[in-house]
Amino acid sequence: MTVLRIGHIELYATEREELVDYFVSALDFADMARARSSRAESSLLQRGDVRLIVTEGDVAAEFLERHGDGVADIAFICDDVAATRDRALAAGARAVGENAVAAFGSVRHSLLPESTRYAPASLPWTPAARAARRADAERSPHIRALDHIAVVLDAGDLHERVEHYIEAFGFERYSSEFIEVGNQAMDSIVARNLAATATFTFLEPVTNREAGQLDAFLDRNAGPGVQHLAFLVDEIVPAVRDFRDRGVDFLTTPGAYYDALSDRLREMSVEIADLRDTNVLADRDEWGYLLQLFTRSPHSRNTLFYELIQRRGARGFGSANIRALYEAVEREDRIVAE
């Protein structure tokens, strides 16, 4: 009853073709296959080890009305589906299908066997997919894998939710961080499966402080949900420049951040100009360095967004940069409000 890895992430979209175009044209995913039923139409996208399914139709209507575009399903590949389901139910999970359980908010976990094959066995190849496969053979893509999934929870639910993942899915608590920014604060815990192939950063606002961007997310999303997906890249600076040219809109970082970075990470001084040009954030832990950058949300409710992350040995999640992300998203919220 072990969660081996994340099989796919399903996003519900009001305009499937528009979101598919964003991932394919801007983030360089391959449009692998399509499927249609009386209640839904889906596109399977893939880049590296990341699989996204973008779905529209009646099956998504209730979710979209409540939350807007967002992650509806994080599918787990399991060594024993039945035993994993039984363990999750025994730990208090709610069944939402024959082999699916509720996760948080309106998000579910489909439980899939290790033998799962996505395409072409389950979905028909499309001409676009064949062209993408030929293009892949001629170049090296930027995105390699899914590094982690960031989830915003209601205040007070953080520790109970993490304990649930430990009991229901055999996850372990990896790290935690309490962040204060002025009169605002947030708490976070990173939990992952034993193989470190399914990693979640769970976040909650702190209620005795001023409302901040986590509270704003909960309002816009009408409850808990996935705040961002973090994609692992080999070299973040060229990836950002490429994606920026393709139309991805990234958050900006104050120039003062890089002035301070020159003192904080002196050994990276020769790279500061490139980091400043691309707005990439840098951090260091006892194992190495981490570089990261976040997109602006391409979705109408300004909820779900995406992260690029490069690891040079670092095992953490940029604790020194969580504050920078918090402040950057706060600035973005003010811009949207104006």
Image (spheres, helix red, strand yellow):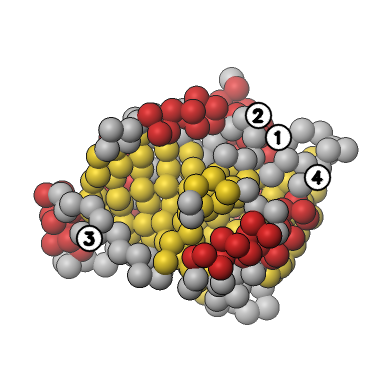
Q: Are marks 1 and 2 in contact (CB under 8 Å)?
A: yes
Secondary structure beneath dot 2 equals helix
Q: Nearer the viewer, mark 1 or mark 4?
A: 4
Q: Which mark is residue 313?
A: none
Q: Amino acid at mark 4?
A: Gly
Q: Amino acid at mark 2?
A: Asp
Which of the marked residues, 2 or 3, is nearer the chain's N terminus? 3
In the picture of the structure, the residue carrying the numbered disc 2 is 219
Q: Nearer the viewer, mark 1 or mark 3?
A: 3
Q: Amino acid at mark 1?
A: Asp
Q: Are marks 4 and 3 in contact (CB under 8 Å)?
A: no
Q: Residue at x 83, y 38 (%)?
A: 207
Q: Which mark is residue 215?
A: 1
Secondary structure beneath dot 1 equals helix
CA distance for labels 4 and 2: 16 Å
Q: Nearer the viewer, mark 4 or mark 3?
A: 3
In the picture of the structure, the residue carrying the numbered disc 4 is 156
In the picture of the structure, the residue carrying the numbered disc 3 is 121
CA distance for labels 1 and 3: 42 Å
Question: As drawn, is 8 to the left or to the right of 97?
Answer: left
